[in-house]
Image (tube, rainbow, N blue to C red):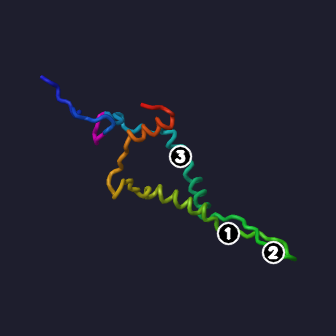
Amino acid sequence: MAEDTKEPQNRKPGVFEKGDPRINPGGRPRIPAEVKEAWAAMTPKGTRMLDEALGATRPVVVSGGKDSPATVEYVPDWTARLTALELLYSRQWGKAPQAITGEDGGPVKVDFAAITEKFRKMAGESE
């Protein structure tokens, strides 16, 4: 009597479906406890650094004119502040999904034969 298998007989190479036994059968590797502890110990310092970045400033030299010396003023460093916000939001809420679509919102189509031909021409090969 033939043994029941869950693997479909008409499976295409490179095409995976949910539950496919070829995909990472052991699951995601566990993060070692000592690594988690080290990350936890760094969290307060990282939080302080992000807090500082949210209020970051940068020096700007302001010309004092012909008879007065130049002075330095500190203005908001928007690049640092926005980078810190992006980091916080992406970790808290996750990155926004980005749709990858082809023409008219359809699936992306790749013509591998045309790509291969272009590379052959670039390399000076002929079929």
Q: Nearer the viewer, residue 13 or 111?
A: 111
Return the residue at label 2.
64
**Residue 27 lies in magenta, yes or no?**
no
Please identify the quarter of the rendering in which residue 71 is found.
Answer: bottom right
Q: Residue furthest front?
A: 126
Q: Nearer the viewer, residue 87 or 16?
A: 16
Residue 24 lies left or right of residue 59; in this view the side is left
Mark 2 Cα shell of 10 Å, populated few (<14), some (14-19), many (≥20):
few
Q: In the drawing, what numbered circle is on residue 75?
A: 1
Q: Name the residue at 55% across, 51% down.
A: 43
| Residue 113 in the image: above or below residue 81 | above
Mark 3 Cα shell of 10 Å, populated few (<14), some (14-19), many (≥20):
few
Please identify the quarter of the rendering in which residue 74 is found.
Answer: bottom right
Residue 23 lies left or right of residue 117; in this view the side is left
Residue type marked 3: Trp
**Where residue 39 sits: x, y (%)?**
53, 46
| Segment tinted magenta in the rendering | 16-21
Mark 3, secondary structure of its residue: helix
Q: Name the residue at 66% across, 65% down.
A: 57
Q: Name the residue at 51% across, 34% down.
A: 123
- Looking at marks 1 and 3 on the same chain, the residue that comes earlier in the sequence is marked by 3
Callout 2–callout 3 Cβ contact below 8 Å: no
Return the residue at label 3.
39
**Where residue 34 sits: x, y (%)?**
51, 39
| Residue 126 in the image: above or below residue 45 | above
Main secondary structure along the magenta-highlighted residues: loop
Mark 1, secondary structure of its residue: strand
Q: CA distance from mark 2 to mark 3?
A: 48 Å
Q: Name the residue at 69% across, 64% down.
A: 58
| Residue 99 in the image: above or below residue 126 | below
Residue 102 lies left or right of residue 75; in this view the side is left
